[in-house]
Image: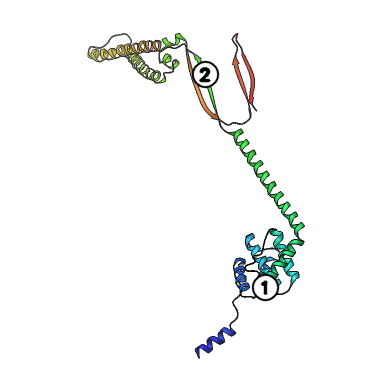
Amino acid sequence: MTWLFLSLWTILAPPAPDPADPAERLELASQESLQGNHQRVIDLLSNLLVPTSQFSTEEEEIKALRLLGLSYWFLNNPAEATSAFTILLNRRPDFKLDPVVVPAGAIVFFNELKTRLREKLQEIERLKKEEEERQKREKEEAERKLQEELRRNAPVLRETTVINQNYMLFNFFPLGIGQFQNGQDGKGWMFVGLQALTAAVSVSSYTYLKYKYPRGLVPRDELVSARQIQYLQVGTGAAFFALWMTSVVDALVFHKPTRTTTDRRYVPGRRRLELYGAPLEGGGLVLGVQGEF
């Protein structure tokens, strides 16, 4: 009883709907072709190729056109077979049918059509090669322009050298001026700090005593503290002058007639104009414009 029910279900059950995906329908059509169901192949593939191909790759389209053309040939419909094979040869002029799996009659039919279309196929092949060469030239030209633009705009290392004249007189100034002139900024800031500190303490001590004891008369009970402040004033003042002399000696020892500074930086390599100025030996200034092109 069970087998009878299954048999009736198999006969009466509706057939499974065709797959919607073009690749799946192509695979199903290939299986139907092997089983000789040529009308089924036509039903599966014809609406996927006309009016436009719905396949995602050229290989799938070529395979579908081959199956469609052979199916029409098997059903003795040379007009539709010619139409399918013509589209196939337009896509791929050098296409050949495999004699191992394709009947000799279909191969003769296909080769005769290929002979009739030879001139057209040669023209298609020529145009295809010209288009490939054109695209290649355009790609090479675009690459050449890109490389040229990159070279033109590539950063350029610019080195600027400035020669500064050092004056002997500056070595005798306080606050590390001689050190700064010699390019010894670390020493210069050290002398600035120490000399400023000792000068400030000495001046502050003197100012305090001057305003607290304007007539120079110090009460007996304040003699000790006043004397200590006076010692601080004299000591820090002496320290200021000692540091000053030290900075003078150091500046004289390391003095050079000129000091050269070099600045290196990358600048955009673009065409540009720049305004520049240069002093004249007899006095005055010359202005000009310089650029890179």
Which residue does the image show at 30% across and 11% down from the upper left? Answer: 234
The three-letter code of the residue at mark 1 reads Asp
Can residue 104 be spotted in the picture?
Answer: yes
Is residue 18 depicted above or below 113 in this figure? below
Q: Label 2 belongs to which residue?
A: 162
Can residue 213 be spotted in the picture?
Answer: no
Q: What distance separates the C-alpha of mark 1 from that of mark 2?
A: 86 Å
Is residue 86 depicted above or below 247 in this figure? below
The three-letter code of the residue at mark 2 reads Val
What crowding class fits label 1: few (fewer than 14 Cα within 10 Å), some (14-19), or many (20 or more)?
Answer: few
What crowding class fits label 2: few (fewer than 14 Cα within 10 Å), some (14-19), or many (20 or more)?
Answer: few
Q: Which of 95 and 192 is in front in this view?
A: 95
Q: In this view, does 235 lie to the left or right of 14?
A: left
Q: In this view, does 182 lie to the left or right of 225?
A: right
Q: Position of residue 198 (x, y in %)?
A: 34, 16
Q: Nearer the viewer, residue 162 or 223?
A: 162
Q: Residue 43 carries which label?
A: 1
Q: Position of residue 126 (x, y in %)?
A: 73, 52
Is residue 131 depicted above or below 72 in this figure? above
Q: Nearer the viewer, residue 140 or 22?
A: 140
Which residue does the image show at 68% across and 69% down from the upper left? Answer: 104
As helix, strand or loop, the secondary structure at mark 1 comes to helix
Choose top left, top right, bottom left or bottom right for residue 157: top right
Between disc 1 and disc 2, whose residue precedes?
A: 1
